[in-house]
Image (tube, rainbow, N blue to C red):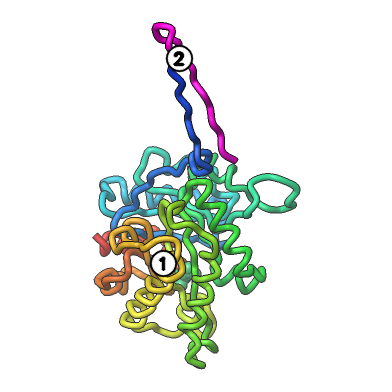
Amino acid sequence: MVYFPILIYNINNAKLIIIFYLSPFTLHPLTNHMLSEKIILATWKMQLSISESINLAKKIKEKLKNHKLEEIDVALCPDFLAIPAVSEIIQNTNIDLGSQNVFWETKGAYTGEISIKNLKHFGVKFVIIGHSERRQNLLESDRMINQKIKTVINEGLIPVLCVGENLEQKNNNQKDIVIMKQVRSALTDIDINNISELIIAYEPIWSISTTKIKQEIETSEIEYTNQLIKQIVMDTLSPQKNISSSEFKNKIKLIFGGSVNSSNIVNLMRQNHVQGVLVGGASLDAEEFTNLINNTL
Ligand code: PGA
């Protein structure tokens, strides 16, 4: 929908007519977030009770109270029911809030789903989309993921798209093709001009700490894959417009997730194409998580 509000002034009997053109994008003004150079997102998955979430948020807040966190964005992604309490605890701090999922429609008869409007009410800034645990356990499809990304972008929040291959795909040398398919379909029909900021997390399923057959990943493999993701994003979005390197850098951040801890973060953050991390297990302990942040600075 496009609106044309008209103002008519009478100046010395001459009429001055001013017409405002509001593009569809102005109807959903994008907040200018301006992400920092480094991003650390903690996802608590479904690991904690409400009181454990409250305690952990309080401890992290306390340990970070003397940090300005100027060059780093830190966000906590509790489960939905803990969001209101955690939101209150981190109010007036430099710690941000994220959610682990969202529904693609903003309102309606969608039993059991959570709307982005209600997430915004509690100050959620980041929304994780397409985590492998949801793709596997809830059969979340590429199409659903694409719809969710569009909604999050339209509502001015920052999507955190997760992509990654499973062990079988890795062993069959299908990693690149799997990543290409996931990234391309997630970004289908998305206009680069409408993207304020987007985070893409490479998360090979076989490197996630809770995976039964967990394996170590080489840092060079992460760097290679994030470069590949960058190329796929450029190719997917560029038919609309040539994306310069600086526009890419400003709008799209590439991060990594999979058994990140306070030790391996140091080497990870030295990579050119790793601007941050999505942390599961290591974010459940305030000491370990804040050490991880300290080792990133
Ligand atoms: P992990 O989880 O840090 O426990 O491996 C990461 C994730 O699943 O995003």
> The disc labelled 1 sits on which kind of residue?
Ala
Badge 1: residue crowd in 10 Å (few <14, some 14–19, many ≥20): many
> The disc labelled 2 sits on which kind of residue?
Lys
User: What range of the chain is rendered magenta?
Assistant: 1-14
Report the disc number at residue 282.
1
Residue nearest the observer in this picture, 24 or 59: 24
Q: Could you say where residue 159 lies in the image, as x and y percent from the top left?
A: 48, 57
SS for dot 2 = strand
Whether the residue under disc 1 has CB within 8 Å of ligand 1: yes
Give the answer, above or below, for where 114 lies relative to 203. above
Furthest residue in direction front, as rendered: 14
Residue nearest the observer in this picture, 78 or 152: 152
Compute the Cα span from label 1 to label 2.
66 Å
Which quarter of the picture shows residue 238?
bottom left
1 or 2: mark nearer the eye: 2
Q: Could you say where residue 154 lies in the image, as x and y percent from the top left?
A: 53, 48
Q: Is residue 12 magenta?
A: yes
Furthest residue in direction top, as rendered: 12
Residue in the picture at 66% in, 71% down? 139
SS for dot 1 = helix
Quadrant position of the N terminus in the picture: top right
Residue underneath mark 2: 15
Residue nearest the observer in this picture, 187 or 14: 14
Q: Is residue 60 left or right of residue 1?
A: left
Furthest residue in direction bottom, as rendered: 172
Q: Could you say where residue 58 lies in the image, as x and y percent from the top left?
A: 42, 47
